[in-house]
Amino acid sequence: MKTRATRELIWRYAPLIIWMALISYASSNEFSALNTSRVVRPILLWLFPNITDESIWLAHFLVRKVSHIIEYAVLGWLAARAFEGSSRAYLRQRWFVAGLLLIVIHALLDEYHQIFVPSRTGSLYDSGIDIAGGLIGLIGFAYRRRRVTGRPWSSGHG
C-alpha cells in the first residue's frame, strides 16, 4: 500500500518539480537574450531574407515574452494537476488558489534570481507576464476539468 501511495505522490508532483527546475535553468545565462538571439536571428534571416534589424529585434522580443507565457501556462497546468489530485483535502479543495500562489512565488523568485545573473535582468514586468501565463494554465485546466468531469472549480463546493 505504501509503495502505491509513493508512486502516486511521485506521479503527481515530479512533473511539477521538474518543470520548476527547468524554468529556473531557463533563467540562467544559457537563455539570456544574447544567447537566444543566436538562434532566433538566423532562423528569421533564413525565413525572411530582407527582414530589418528592427523587425528582428521585435520578433526576438516577442518570442522571449511568448516563451514566458508558455512556460508558466505549463507550470499552471502542472500545479493544478498536482494539487487537484492531492491526498490533502486542503490542497484538493483549493487547488486553483494553491496553484496561483505557487506561480506568483515562483515568478517573483525567478526574476529575483536573474538580478544575480550578469547577462540577465530581473523585471516585475516579466513576473506579470509569467503570472498571466500561469493563470492561462490554471483556467485551461479548470475548463478541461469542468468539461470532462462536470466538476466545478473547487471540489469542496459542489
Image (spheres, helix red, strand yellow):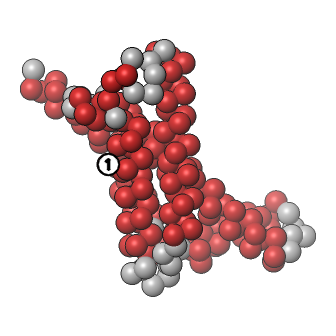
Q: Nearer the viewer, residue 41 or 16?
A: 16
Q: Quadrant of the N terminus?
A: top left
Q: Position of residue 130 (x, y in %)?
A: 52, 57
Residue extending furthest toward the right: 50
Position of 102 relative to 142 (above/below): below
* Location of residue 63 (image quadrant): bottom right
Position of 138 relative to 106 (above/below): above
Residue extending furthest toward the bottom: 118
Q: Quadrant of the C terminus?
A: top left
Q: How would you rate the neighbour count of disc 1 (Cα within 10 Å): few for under 14, some for 14-19, many for 20 or more? A: some
* Location of residue 111 (image quadrant): bottom left
Q: Position of residue 115 (x, y in %)?
A: 43, 79
Side (left or right) of 84 relative to 52: left
Residue extending furthest toward the front: 157
Residue occupying the point 85% across, 63% down: 48
Residue occupying the point 34% across, 35% down: 94
Q: Can you see residue 11?
A: no
Position of 13 relative to 66 (above/below): above
Secondary structure beneath dot 1 equals: helix
Tag 1: residue type? Ile
Q: Nearer the viewer, residue 30 or 130?
A: 130
Q: Can you see residue 24?
A: yes
Residue occupying the point 40% across, 73% down: 112
* Location of residue 55 (image quadrant): bottom right
Q: Position of residue 149 (x, y in %)?
A: 46, 15
Q: Nearer the viewer, residue 63 or 125?
A: 125
Q: Position of residue 5 (x, y in %)?
A: 16, 27
Residue highlighted by disc 1:
17
Side (left or right) of 85 relative to 75: left
How many marks are shown on the rendered structure?
A: 1
